[in-house]
Image (cartoon, rainbow, N blue to C red):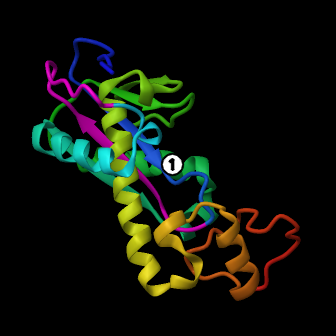
């Protein structure tokens, strides 16, 4: 699948992973790709197998002009809400970029302006624009690694498999063991939830 650039300017793509999870951080990536760089299988991370994502990640990192990761914790998410946390994660990723760019491309319909840069929001941008797709892969892989690492300390929640998403096994573990500091207390953690004692 050959994804396109948005413009002839030096553009940077941004995307996040983990918005729908019950636990763990939201993670964003920012990527600047060379103008003539093509990865034939580059696509939205959700449409790729884990094996393929890891293969493409290696190509992205070895060929990108610049890339970075921004992280916002579960505690911060509870304070500012998940939408603002997603924007903040992208801002943190952009803060780490040490190469010049002219245009920011965002996956989705909304974004909080970053400094004085022009930005464009593109719905399903991760399946249309190469730099956004690259960012979606780096964000997804980075967050998966974080959740696998956290699962070593909190193995009863099965995060190594569900990555914090609301699977039946994850919800059952919350019912049985309660929540930990990595759970997003502002989220509906259980279907019949009224109040969580923490």
**Residue segment shown in magenta:** 23-42
- Relative to the observer, which residue lies in front, 113 or 107? 107
Asked whether the viewer can see residue 49, the reply is yes
Asked whether the viewer can see residue 92, the reply is no
* Dominant secondary structure (helix, strand or loop) of the stretch shown in magenta: loop
**Residue located at (46% from left, 34% from top):** 113
* In magenta segment, residue 123: no
Please indicate whether residue 183 sits to the left or right of residue 97 in the image: right
Name the image quarter holding the C terminus.
Answer: bottom right
Q: Against 187, is 42 above or below? A: above
Helix, strand or loop for disc 1: helix
- Relative to the observer, which residue lies in front, 91 or 147? 147
* In magenta segment, residue 41: yes
Mark 1: give few (<14), some (14-19) or many (20+) Cα within 10 Å.
Answer: many
- Relative to the observer, which residue lies in front, 123 or 8? 123
In percent of width and height, residue 65 lies at 13, 36
Q: Against 129, is 135 above or below? A: below
**Residue located at (51% from left, 71% from top):** 159
In percent of width and height, residue 69 lies at 31, 53
Residue matched to label 1? 86
């Amino acid at each position: 699948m050959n994804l396109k650039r948005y413009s002839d300017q030096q553009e940077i793509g941004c995307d996040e992973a983990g918005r729908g999870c019950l636990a763990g951080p939201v993670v964003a990536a920012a990527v600047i790709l060379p103008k003539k760089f093509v990865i034939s299988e580059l696509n939205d991370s959700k449409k790729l197998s884990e094996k393929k994502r890891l293969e493409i990640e290696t190509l992205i990192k070895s060929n990108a002009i610049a890339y970075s990761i921004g992280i916002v914790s579960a505690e911060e998410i509870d304070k500012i809400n998940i939408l603002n946390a997603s924007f903040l994660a992208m801002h943190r990723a952009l803060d780490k970029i040490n190469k010049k760019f002219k245009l920011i491309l965002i996956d989705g319909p909304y974004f909080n302006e970053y400094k004085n840069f022009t930005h464009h929001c593109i719905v399903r941008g991760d399946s249309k624009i190469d730099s956004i797709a690259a960012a979606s892969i780096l964000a997804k892989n980075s967050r998966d690694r974080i959740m696998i690492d956290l699962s070593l300390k909190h193995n009863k929640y099965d995060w190594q498999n569900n990555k914090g998403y609301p699977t039946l096994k994850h919800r059952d573990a919350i019912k049985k063991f309660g929540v930990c500091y990595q759970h997003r207390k502002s989220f509906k953690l259980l279907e019949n939830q009224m109040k969580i004692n923490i």
